[in-house]
Amino acid sequence: MSIDKAQGFVLNKRDLRETSIIVDFYTKEFGKISGILKGIRTEPEKFASNLEPFSLNEIIFYRKTRSSLHLVAQADKLNNFTGIRQSIERTATAGFMMELVGSIMQPEDKNEEIFNLTLDAVKELETNYNPEKIATIFKIKMLKLSGFKPHFDSCVSCMDKIMGQSKFSLSLGGLLCPACMPKDPAARSIFRGTVATVLHIEKNSFLNSLSLGMNPQIKKELDLILNAFLNFHLGRQLKSQKLLNKIEVAA
């Protein structure tokens, strides 16, 4: 058992017996890890953080070699992103980001680019007045960096470059050229502007992508396709996405 230090976002937490909690973190140093904080529910003063969802913490933990559940000895809050918590929509968006990271990333699969993307997105969410756009860009960048992304840069079947019309296949996970469209009769048409938007965001940084214009029709199609892709390949709809859908309808 070794003692390690890491910076990590709280992805989620759950109670363990009457005194302790288990927290899933996404850390810069080790990727996604799970840790138990013993006694925090009865003696919260033992820790310098209350481990709120999407807060950034520095943790010291005993890393077990024969278990995926480590023992967290110390947790210090680095940033609680209080500005986000003043808005239901921003809080729900941050929760979506955490659930997406937790659902896609495998335990202890280190990826500093994804950690930095998450940090940039949460910081931007605290000050930016367009949570929907932030969520869409985060989704595209997250899928790209994790290797889980749908195939948008050529035909997913024959791998030829697509110059004209294309369709998107959920089951095959990408675009189909006209010659390959019969391979998935359920494939749906997609605007060329939507494809161009995805490719632009994949090639540029998160912060640079925020300045990209996105008309409502393309934004709607992007969310429809990306959410359907996630639901199909994860085998479920993210709970936080359901909440965001309800907030959008109410707005």
Image: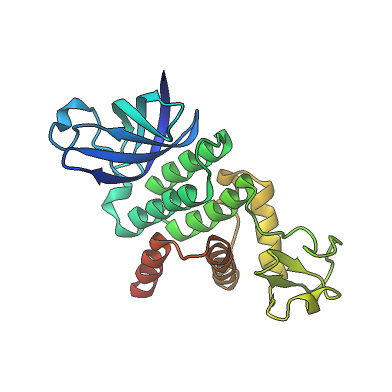
Q: Is residue 130 visible?
A: no
Q: Residue at x 42, y 48 (%)?
A: 98
Count every numbered label the image shows and give the total.
0
Q: Which of the 4 image quadrants contains residue 178?
A: bottom right
Q: Residue furthest left?
A: 42
Q: Residue at x 35, y 34 (%)?
A: 35
Q: Is residue 184 left or right of residue 47?
A: right
Colour convention:
rainbow
Q: Residue at x 49, y 40 (%)?
A: 120
Q: Nearer the viewer, residue 155 or 211?
A: 155
Residue 37 location (% of width, % of height): 27, 33
Q: Residue at x 42, y 29 (%)?
A: 7
Q: Nearer the viewer, residue 3 or 214?
A: 3
Q: Which of the 4 image quadrants contains residue 166?
A: bottom right
Residue 116 location (% of width, % of height): 52, 36
Quarter of the C terminus within the rendering: bottom left
Quarter of the N terminus within the rendering: top left
Residue 159 vertical position relative to residue 101 in the rendered view, above or below: below
Q: Is residue 47 left or right of residue 67?
A: left
Q: Nearer the viewer, residue 230 or 18?
A: 18
Q: Nearer the viewer, residue 198 or 128?
A: 198
Q: Residue furthest front?
A: 66
Q: Is residue 201 visible?
A: yes
Residue 99 location (% of width, % of height): 43, 52
Residue 57 location (% of width, % of height): 35, 32
Q: Is residue 40 left or right of residue 65?
A: left
